[in-house]
Image (tube, helix red, strand yellow):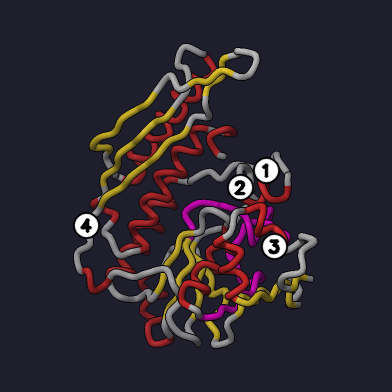
């Protein structure tokens, strides 16, 4: 969806996400390499050509910022179709970024699922009002939000620092905050490990424009991570992450629920993990009844 709004931002975000996924499993992102795959419409159309150039510029700037070279790639151009009246249309331009990096010690690799109760939950990175092209906008039928835009220098610093902390065994579980934002990442980590989580929105590192719970929960600001850290590793983790914006936003709990506390300390959302997983496994239209703010009967949300 980002590509429809800003192909340059889409390219930066795609590289950021690919490298984030590597970091979250214990790879050394300082040695990462990239591949691109453009699938685009008619390059003879000035608008489509302009979008393609913007995406290519985003790839270039991301590679330079993250010190990650493109070692190969491919493109598929002239992808068009005719409507019922015979008018020609280009497909939405899309970009696939693949990334590779070594995992020095497979024993230090981590997974996304929460492991046990009573561990700290940290959010790395700033949350801003960046819902443009997001899953939230698709669900709510809204448009016009700001497109998530990677800030390359701070993104690289956070990514490399976190990558080193994970390789040093300081993080138990890790997940990037991309599609769906904090709410979806927390739900995925919780029901994957069958371990509940309590989250306090007041503790989320955020800019001034992220002033309401919907934005904090569903913004897709880039370069963010949700982490599980054991109590015995917290001090070393905080020392290793010095200089990187982060907040201890909650903890894992034995009760198999996702609980979110609002900015005024009231309970905003409390949902059983089994119901979240069931909704996640369905198509979006079938799952809408269980989302906060819908008219469905599943779960509870103030």
Q: Does the residue at mark 2 contact the one at mark 3 (Cβ under 8 Å)? A: no
Q: Which of the 4 quarters of the picture holds residue 161?
A: bottom left
Whether the magenta-drawn stretch holds residue 103 is answered as: no
Q: Earlier in the sequence, mark 2 or mark 3?
A: 2
Q: Does the residue at mark 1 contact the one at mark 3 (Cβ under 8 Å)? A: no
Residue highlighted by disc 1: 145
Question: At 53% across and 64% down in the image, what residue appears?
Answer: 185
Residue highlighted by disc 3: 291
Counting other residues with Cα less than 10 Å from the Cα at mark 1, is it few (<14), some (14-19), or many (20 or more)? Answer: some
In three-dimensional space, the C-alpha distance between marks 1 and 3, rounded to whole angstroms, equals: 20 Å
The residue range painted magenta reads 195-224
Residue highlighted by disc 2: 134
- Examine the rendered structure and indicate whether residue 237 appears above or below residue 55: below
Q: Single out the mark in the foreground, 1 or 2.
A: 2
Residue 271 on image: x %, y %? 66, 74
- Examine the rendered structure and indicate whether residue 128 appears above or below residue 148: below
Residue 255 on image: x %, y %? 58, 86
Q: Does the residue at mark 4 contact the one at mark 2 (Cβ under 8 Å)? A: no
Q: Single out the mark in the foreground, 2 or 3.
A: 3
Whether the magenta-drawn stretch holds residue 221 is answered as: yes
Residue highlighted by disc 4: 102
In three-dimensional space, the C-alpha distance between marks 3 and 4, rounded to whole angstroms, equals: 39 Å
Image quadrant where one finds the C terminus: bottom right
Q: How many marks?
A: 4
- Secondary structure found at label 4: loop
Image quadrant where one finds the N terminus: top right
Q: Does the residue at mark 1 contact the one at mark 2 (Cβ under 8 Å)? A: yes
Q: Earlier in the sequence, mark 1 or mark 3?
A: 1
In three-dimensional space, the C-alpha distance between marks 2 and 3, rounded to whole angstroms, equals: 15 Å
- As rendered, which of 238 and 44 lies closer to the eye? 44
Determine whether, in the image, residue 58 is placed left or right of residue 22. right
In three-dimensional space, the C-alpha distance between marks 4 and 1, rounded to whole angstroms, equals: 37 Å
């Amino acid at each position: 969806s980002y590509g429809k709004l800003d192909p340059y931002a889409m390219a930066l975000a795609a590289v950021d996400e690919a490298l984030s996924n590597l970091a979250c499993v214990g790879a050394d992102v300082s040695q990462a390499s990239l591949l691109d795959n453009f699938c685009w419409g008619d390059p003879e159309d000035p608008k489509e050509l302009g979008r393609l150039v913007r995406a290519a510029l985003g790839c270039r700037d991301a590679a330079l910022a993250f010190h990650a070279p493109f070692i190969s790639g491919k493109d598929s151009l002239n992808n068009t179709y005719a409507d019922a009246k015979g008018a020609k249309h280009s497909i939405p331009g899309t970009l696939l970024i693949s990334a590779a990096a070594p995992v020095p010690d497979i024993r230090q690799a981590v997974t996304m699922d929460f492991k046990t109760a009573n561990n700290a939950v940290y959010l790395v990175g700033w949350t801003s009002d960046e819902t443009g092209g997001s899953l939230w906008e698709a669900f709510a039928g809204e448009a016009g939000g700001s497109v998530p835009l990677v800030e390359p220098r701070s993104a690289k610093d956070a990514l490399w620092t976190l990558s080193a902390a994970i390789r040093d065994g300081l993080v138990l579980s890790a997940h990037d905050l991309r599609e769906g934002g904090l709410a979806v990442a927390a739900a995925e980590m919780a029901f994957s490990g069958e371990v509940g989580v309590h989250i306090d929105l007041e503790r989320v590192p955020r800019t001034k424009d992220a002033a309401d719970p919907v934005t904090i929960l569903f913004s897709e600001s880039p370069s963010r991570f949700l982490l599980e850290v054991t109590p015995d590793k917290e001090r070393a983790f905080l020392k290793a992450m010095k200089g990187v914006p982060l907040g201890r936003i909650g903890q894992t709990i034995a009760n198999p629920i996702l609980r979110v506390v609002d900015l005024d300390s009231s309970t905003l959302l409390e949902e059983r993990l089994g119901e979240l997983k069931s909704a996640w496994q369905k198509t979006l239209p079938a799952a809408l009844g269980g989302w906060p703010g819908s008219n469905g009967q599943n779960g509870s949300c103030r």
